[in-house]
């Protein structure tokens, strides 16, 4: 299959899943996750009309995207991996949405850059629905309070919540939990669902599905399992692990 064929296949599956759930497929944004793939792999999808892409590392995106963004002004880039506070400025120069807001220090840094003239990104608070120690995200218990602090203390508009269910769990209960927290917190967006489970996520109300391998094919080993939003994909010479705070 060509990239364009895979794209129309994924789009058809999104439409069918939305139809089964009685939802409008236009309410589901496909974020094409192009991490590890070069710009040449991305252009056929852009030519086929895909305008929303996801990357999990700021540095990789900074190498891959500036030229494409300059050429196609409709493109929207989403950061789906962890963001180190000291890369906030670089991230906001590239990305239109951040899916990994999970701590006050990062909220402060984002608010400061916006005040200094950076673009206001769409913001998703990442929730560690499986409470996995190695995974980023606020705990389900703290999520609504964190959203409130982002709004009231940090002055940030929060567009939604994001989660990455544990690889060994059924995803449905995690998607349901994220939806419940979203109702409590008064957020409308739900960034959930990847290649293996985006149809399930749509049944549970996903507004953004993050699909990589179903569009681009398998990624080179060491096989990223998307388990921790990219944490485990960092090799030597990459951006490093969790920032020390
Ligand atoms: C890599 C990644 C994805 C895409 O995963 P696929 O299984 O390739 O669709 C989605 N979300 C996050 C946070 C990721 O790191």
Image: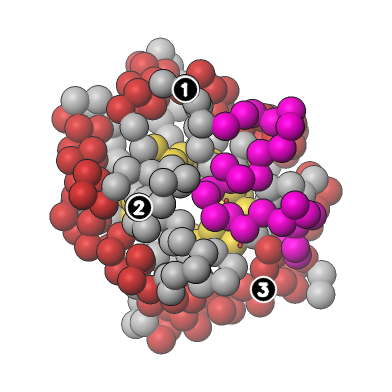
Check the image and name the residue furthest to the bottom. Answer: 20
Q: Is residue 39 above or below residue 83?
A: below
The answer to whether residue 161 is magenta is no
Above or below, 74 relative to 87 = below
Q: Residue at 23%, 40% (x, y): give it.
A: 147
What residue did someone put label 2 on? Answer: 131
Secondary structure state at the residue bearing disc 2: loop
| Image quadrant occupied by the C terminus | top left
Q: Which residue in the structure is indicated by mark 1?
A: 244
**Residue behind label 1 places its C-beta within 8 angstroms of ligand 1:** no
What are the residue bounds of the magenta stretch? Answer: 216-241
Query: Going by the image, does 10 lie left or right of 178?
Result: right
State which tag comes first along the sequence, 3 or 2.
Answer: 3
Quadrant where ligand 1 appears: bottom right
Magenta stretch: helix, strand or loop mostly: loop
Q: Earlier in the sequence, mark 3 or mark 1?
A: 3
Q: Residue at x 57, y 42 (%)?
A: 231
Write down the residue under mark 3.
8
The location of residue 244, given as percent across then percent down, is 47, 22
Residue drawn at (66%, 39%) of the image: 234
Q: How many marks?
A: 3
- Residue 44, image x, y percentages: 78, 57
Viewer-closest of 170 and 52: 170
Residue 238 shows up from this direction: yes
């Amino acid at each position: 299959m060509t990239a364009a064929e895979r794209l129309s296949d994924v789009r058809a599956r999104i439409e069918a899943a939305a139809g089964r759930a009685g939802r409008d497929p236009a309410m589901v944004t496909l974020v094409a996750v192009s991490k590890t793939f070069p710009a040449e792999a991305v252009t056929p999808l852009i030519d086929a009309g895909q305008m929303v892409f996801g990357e999990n590392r700021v540095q990789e995106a900074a190498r891959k995207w500036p030229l494409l963004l300059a050429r196609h002004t409709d493109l929207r880039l989403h950061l789906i991996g962890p963001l180190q506070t000291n890369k906030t400025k670089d991230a906001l120069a590239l990305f239109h949405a951040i899916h990994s807001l999970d701590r006050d220090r990062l909220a402060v840094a984002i608010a400061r850059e916006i005040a200094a003239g950076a673009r206001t990104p769409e913001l998703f608070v990442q929730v560690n629905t499986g409470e996995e120690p190695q995974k980023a995200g606020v705990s389900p218990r703290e999520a609504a309070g964190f959203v409130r602090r982002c709004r009231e203390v940090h002055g940030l508009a929060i567009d939604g919540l994001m989660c990455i269910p544990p690889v060994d769990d059924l995803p449905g209960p995690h998607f349901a939990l994220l939806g419940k927290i979203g109702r409590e917190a008064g957020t409308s967006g739900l960034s959930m669902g990847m290649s293996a489970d985006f149809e399930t996520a749509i049944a549970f109300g996903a507004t953004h599905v993050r699909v990589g391998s179903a569009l681009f094919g398998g990624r080179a080993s060491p096989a990223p399992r998307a388990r921790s939003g990219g944490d485990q994909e960092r090799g030597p010479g990459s951006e490093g692990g969790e920032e020390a705070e």
